[in-house]
Amino acid sequence: MTLIYIVAMVLVGVGAYLTGRQKGVAFAVAGVAPGGARMHSLPSYHGFYVAVAAVAPMLLLLLLWQPFAPRFVEMQALSSLPQHLVPTDELQRSTRMREIVTLANGGQVPDAPAGVQAGADAFVLWRGLADWALLIFGGALALVGFGWATRQLSPEFRARNRVERVVKVVLLACSAVAVLTTVGIVFSVLFETLRFFSKYPWYDFLFGLQWSPQTAIRADQVGASGSFGAVPLFAGTTLIMLIAMTVAGPIGLFSAIYMAEYASPRVRGIAKPVLEVLAGVPTVVFGFFAALTVAPFIRNTGEMLGLNVASESALAAGLVMGVMIIPFVSSLSDDVINAVPQSLRDGSYGMGATKSETIKKVILPAALPGIVSAFMLAISRAVGETMIVVMAAGLAGNLTFNPLEAVTTVTVQIKTLLVGDQEFDSAKTLSAFALGFVLFFFTLVLNFIALRIVQKYREQYD
Amino acid sequence: MDATAALTTPSATGAASADAVANPKIVAKNVNVHYGEKHALKDVSVDIAERAVTAFIGPSGCGKSTFLRCINRMNDTISICRVTGRITIDEQDIYDPSLDVVQLRARVGMVFQKPNPFPKSIYENVAYGPRIHGFARSKAELDEIVEDSLRKASLWNEVKDRLDDSGTGLSGGQQQRLCIARAIAVSPEIILMDEPCSALDPIATAKIEELIDELRQNFTIVIVTHSMQQAARVSQRTAFFHLGVLVEGGPTERIFTSPNDRRTQDYITGRFG
Ligand SMILES: Nc1ncnc2c1ncn2[C@@H]1O[C@H](COP(=O)(O)OP(=O)(O)OP(=O)(O)O)[C@@H](O)[C@H]1O
Ligand SMILES: [Mg+2]
């Protein structure tokens, strides 16, 4: 039904556009004649304006209608059931509705009580009514909008400016959706975090050294209350991030320098896309590469050297994560290096500097802010990464800075806490939100710093 | 060869002997430059006098910058650019494969059309060249070079109290003088200037012109300019380029008063260009 409505909207839009443009063309013809008024806007703007005036109310109606109509139809169906079949709780209600919808769509429900058919009939009736009402209302609104808009058209009418405003509103609406979603997520996480802190003191969470979130189901079991000291997780996250950046920082930066300054256009044309493909590899693929190839390799090498290496180690996860974020560092650094004006290079070469002197003393200092922000973005990427760590670094919340031991990270614990059947108001589940909030806060700060640095960098050349 | 009117070729006019350069610092012979398929410079031959200012004039796109960039091999940085012919400085072929380009560019400094100070402090801008070439053994020596260069570029008095400020924070004219100071600091023998005043106001331009006149005592200067008046004011010799060809060259006064070639005459009287 919604589909028909949307098709109708498109048809109305096209029709209104053509009508509006037709009028515009008529004005234009009249305007060329001696004594005729010169048109303000091109005919197509008239058409577009009329189309918007007709379609916008229809679209609004649909958006308002969509959440309420099905609920209304459902209520009608349930209230026409015989008394003994009217559901009393949520579970019954959803079973009943499933039966009604199946019957209404012409299906069979073998063990349905006899009276359900009455509900199904009501459902079909009201659904039909609702659909027709939508179409008729929509059509009426479109007509009103269309009439209102066509009435306004005249040679002097500033359709072009109106259309400009419509464009602005549409763009604004889209960015509003994005911003509101973010705000919504932040607030829901914040809210759950506060609930967690009402069950568990925040200083124990932020500064506690013991992470064992398993709470007992029954109060008399051992270890009845979990311990949510998140420091081991922060330490693990930091450790893996450091290892990853040790790999990705130099390799990414140096390959960016090579791409930007040394590579011939042909090499660059091939190497750059290939490097960027690395960014497109799903992280789970990196994950099993880490778990199946790198981790055993590190363990074997470690054993040969007489070191005690856990089968899942921070080193394995960090190395692979480093490889994963190389493209972030290199691609962004490459862009900022390319943004350094050619005139600075010329200036340096013109003084008899060699290529590497020029890079070291002129290009990198000039590009430094941009490179720093590339690193920041790569770090927030590393901190947010889950899959690789789950597969390669383990789940044990060891408080250690030894890269050969198993560690765990914030993201991994969030995933572990929320996987499986959980009560949604236990401290264990809620702690995931608190972790999420910390993570969010951390990446927010990083991104903020990166953005500020980039801004400063912009000022320098513009 | 006729169209190139090399300064040393006596065939052009009777006045040629007066045109000849007594002590050529740079000698170019049959220089051709191609950018890919485009033939940008055609058989250019010219002598450039030592410790004098030589101006290149000509309509836009005629190859002045291209030729200027041949003299310190800046064209090497453009991958599609191909240079043939022979250019010598002090009788040494600069396109000789055994020649060290980095050394060459230290001898032949360049000032660009748009001031391009490095985003570093004023001091560091000037100290850049001496540092990479290892001219100064101590901080005091480096200070001296910096001060000396800034003085020669008549910028010292304006910046001596803020040597640590960023070079990009100076005004356009000051930036251009900073770039000149930066070039001088390497104590080159030749300074190439590609329209050094095109981004400057008349007052800054006058300062730079004055400066060029002083620098002529110690350096060989080649300047590209679009201003006929500027060429007349600052240069001793002038060369006129047209469509990739060096039409004629000679003492500035002669070029501006009695050009041999019809095209030169048309250009300096403003009939085309
Ligand atoms: N990097 C390049 N790639 C391709 N062609 C070039 C390049 N640089 C210059 N050219 C071409 O070579 C010719 C000469 O250019 P050049 O820059 O030497 O002119 P110019 O005399 O300095 O002009 P202007 O007075 O406008 O600076 C022009 O036709 C130009 O299109
Ligand atoms: Mg030029």
Image (cartoon, grey):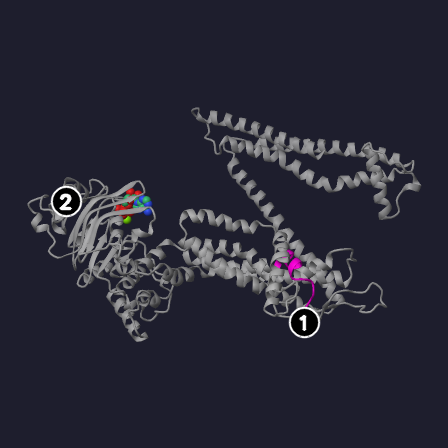
Q: Inspect the magenta stretch and tell me whether residue B154 lies in it.
A: no
Quarter holding the C terminus of chain A? bottom left
State the residue at coordinates (51%, 25%): A26
| A281 vs B50, nearest the viewer | A281
The residue furthest front is A304
The residue furthest right is A84
Q: Is residue A115 left or right of residue A246?
A: right
Quarter holding the N terminus of chain A? top right
Q: Do marks 2 and 1 share a chain?
A: no
Q: Amino acid at mark 2?
A: Ala
* Of labels 2 and 1, the one closer to you: 2
In the image, which disc is placed on residue B5? 2
- Name the spot of residue B72 as percent of width and height, x first: 26, 55
Residue range (magenta): A383-398
**Based on the displayed image, in which of its 4 quarters is residue A200 positioned?**
bottom right
In the image, which disc is placed on residue A207? 1
Q: Is residue A7 left or right of residue B86?
A: right
Judged from the image, the secondary structure of the residue bearing numbered disc 1 is helix
